[in-house]
Every structure is written in C-alpha cells, then in structure tokens.
Amino acid sequence: MTVSERSVWVQLFVMPLVAVGYFSVVLSRAADESVAEISWVVPMIWAIGVVVAGIIAGTIASAIGSAVAAAARGEEPELEEGDQRDKEIERLGNRKAQFFTGIGTMAVIVLCMFRVDPFWIASTMFLAGILAGVHGAIAKLRAYRRGF
C-alpha cells in the first residue's frame, strides 16, 4: 500500500469523525441559545486544525505501523513511493470532490443572498468541504481497489 493510499484511508476516518464532533458541539449550543449568539468560530478553527493535524499524524502513524508490521514478519520495511497510477487516482478523487465543492459554493451563495446568519453560511461551507473530502476519498479508494 502506497503512502498516498494510506493517507486516503486516514482522511476517510478523520474527516467524518471531526465533522460529527464539530456539529455535536455547535448544535448542542443551538438548543440553548439563538443561532446569532452561538460561539462557533473557535470550534470550527479547532475542527479544521484537527482535520489537518489528524491526517498528517495518522498518515505518519500508519506508515510507521506498516513498517513495524513488516519488520515483525521478517520482511524489509519499505515505503512505497507513488507512481503515475497514484497521480491519476488523485486527479480522479479531486474531480469527484469538485461536485460537492460546487454544490456547497452554490448553497453558500444562496445563503448570502438571503442574508442568513454567518453561522449557517460557515457551517454549510464546512460541511461541503467535509463531504467533498469524503466523497473524493471514497472515489480514490474505489480506484485503488477496483481500478479505474
């Protein structure tokens, strides 16, 4: 398994987990406060930071774990560099993710037209990013497992 594929698996695990955490925090606050008074900026900054750090740390941990497992089996641990196939899979996943990015952008534009509270605009944009990342990761994993 290449480093790129490991990173996709980590992304598929981290992004939904962080999104559930973010939305559970801010929506639980919405039960007690009006949407205009919800403190959502700091949880969103933390969520974005955790996604980035989680993907980086998870990819590193999975590479180390793979190397340790290979050494335990008596094999020579090696990091497989990506090749042309990895680049094509990356492009495919990015194209698939663009669908949710486009839908999310249109939704944000509509929300702005109706002067909706910034909480909903930012949360919609965050959700669109998460959905785009997850959809792109699923497309990449399908390509890795089944081919193009």
Image (cartoon, helix red, strand yellow):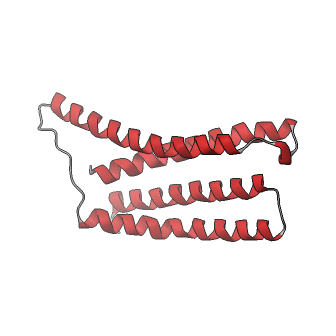
Displayed quadrant of residue 56? top left
Q: Residue at x 39, y 69 (%)?
A: 91
Q: Residue at x 53, y 69 (%)?
A: 98
Expressed as whole percent of the image width and height from the top left, the position of residue 107 reads: 71, 67
Left or right, residue 121 beside residue 88? right
Left or right, residue 16 beside residue 110? left
Displayed quadrant of residue 112? bottom right
In the displayed structure, would residue 127 be above or below residue 56?
A: below
Expressed as whole percent of the image width and height from the top left, the position of residue 129 reads: 58, 58
Q: Residue at x 61, y 71 (%)?
A: 102
Expressed as whole percent of the image width and height from the top left, the position of residue 133 reads: 51, 57
Left or right, residue 43 beside residue 98? right
Front residue (pair 141, 54): 54
Q: Quadrant of the C terminus?
A: bottom left
Left or right, residue 57 beside residue 133? left
Displayed quadrant of residue 115? bottom right
Q: How many marks?
A: 0
In the displayed structure, would residue 131 be above or below residue 94?
A: above
Front residue (pair 77, 51): 51
